[in-house]
Image: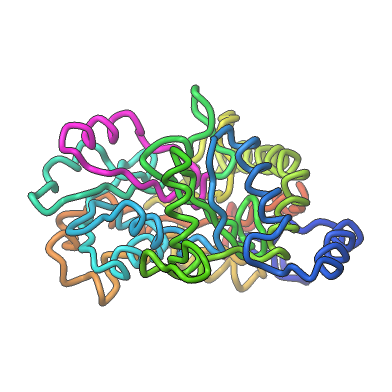
Amino acid sequence: MSFEKKIYVTQPDLPPLDDFLPYLEKIWDSRILTNAGPFHGELEEAMCKYLGVKHLALFSNGTLALITALQALRVTGEVITTPYSFVATAHSLLWNGIKPVFVDIDPRTFNLDPGQIEAAITPQTTAIMPVHCYGQPCDVDAIQNIADIYNLKVIYDAAHAFGVKDKGGSIVRHGDLSVLSFHATKVFNTFEGGAIVCPDAKTKHRIDQLKNFGYVDEVTVAAPGINGKMSEFNAALGLLQLQRVDLALARRREIGALYVDLLNAVPGIRCVLPRDEQSLNYSYFPILVEEQYPLSRDALYEWLREQGVWVRRYFYPLISDFPMYRGLASARRDNLPVAAAIAIKVLCLPIYPNLEDDLVRDIVTLIASPA
């Protein structure tokens, strides 16, 4: 079996061009392209309403939002984080002159293991930066309890977690700050974009200054800020996407459920995400290739790509394996046995709202009967 076109692990969920043109015409007529224009303000307000939070600051991308979040909380010294994430998580620490301290992950959720955090705390530790991996919520209560005991800040990398909820509401309301990504491959996208969920107006005000070079007014710069502003084009797309996001989330859950039903019959393949979890967003669909499967993970990866199925090995290698991190004591493999084991087994399958059920079945057929 082969496909005539490649199926990417994530395809941008884009609105019809005709729906976007009225927004473009308004931008063109207003001549306001950036610098907190009207669409920017509308999107911040709409996002707060959708997510059930009081304050949110938009950014041009999630990485700049992470960097700025650390600046806003004046984080220094050491920050405990996960090795099992996209490199932007740890890179944001290095850009702020902060030392990452890696802690192993939970074997069930792949999130930072709260049971390992306390042993990694030193007098230089000032914060914890967990990741809601694949949109699965971290153990926020356990992490917050540790942070309260040791007087640490908590900044969540919630790049995967748009639309994810727990029993109290949106998962992004937890921590001192939560950072979202609206990259084109995300559940909710603005081509490029991101946001910081803020606990109060004072914190948002500081973040808004930091993302605009630190300007207070035309003649006053209060901090060494950065250019992290979201443009009006990105904000307009966000407003349009927000109208469609619930349908996209619902379709992702349908696809996820179908994958689980079909893959449960394939020996040696283990699904990570639960079938009936309505609080998840299925931003990714990870599977584990276990020893009883006839191919190694990498062999299956190559086989599927040869067939036109663009799977991804998220997250491999571990962040801690890259040259700028591997010299850290916390990056040793014996310190991260669970993350190391998961990284060589994981494979993320294609999932996006326009993925048809028949293609899902074809993909599973390939996995069930590899060459």
- Farthest residue in the left direction? 123
Q: Quadrant of the C terminus?
A: bottom right
Side of 240 where 156 appears, left or right: left
Nearest the camera: 281 or 263? 281
Q: Residue at x 57, y 55 (%)?
A: 58
Q: Residue 40: percent from the left, percent from the top?
A: 67, 56
Side of 182 where 255 appears, left or right: right
- Farthest residue in the front direction? 219
Applied colour scheme: rainbow
Q: Residue 337: percent from the left, percent from the top?
A: 22, 52
Q: Which residues are magenta?
A: 132-161
User: Vertical placement of 248 versus 214: above or below?
Assistant: above
- Farthest residue in the right direction? 18
Side of 154 where 119 appears, left or right: left
Q: Residue 239: percent from the left, percent from the top?
A: 74, 50
**Residue 365 appearing in the image:** no
Nearest the camera: 215 or 23? 215
Side of 88 where 332 appears, left or right: left
User: Vertical placement of 223 versus 158: above or below?
Assistant: below
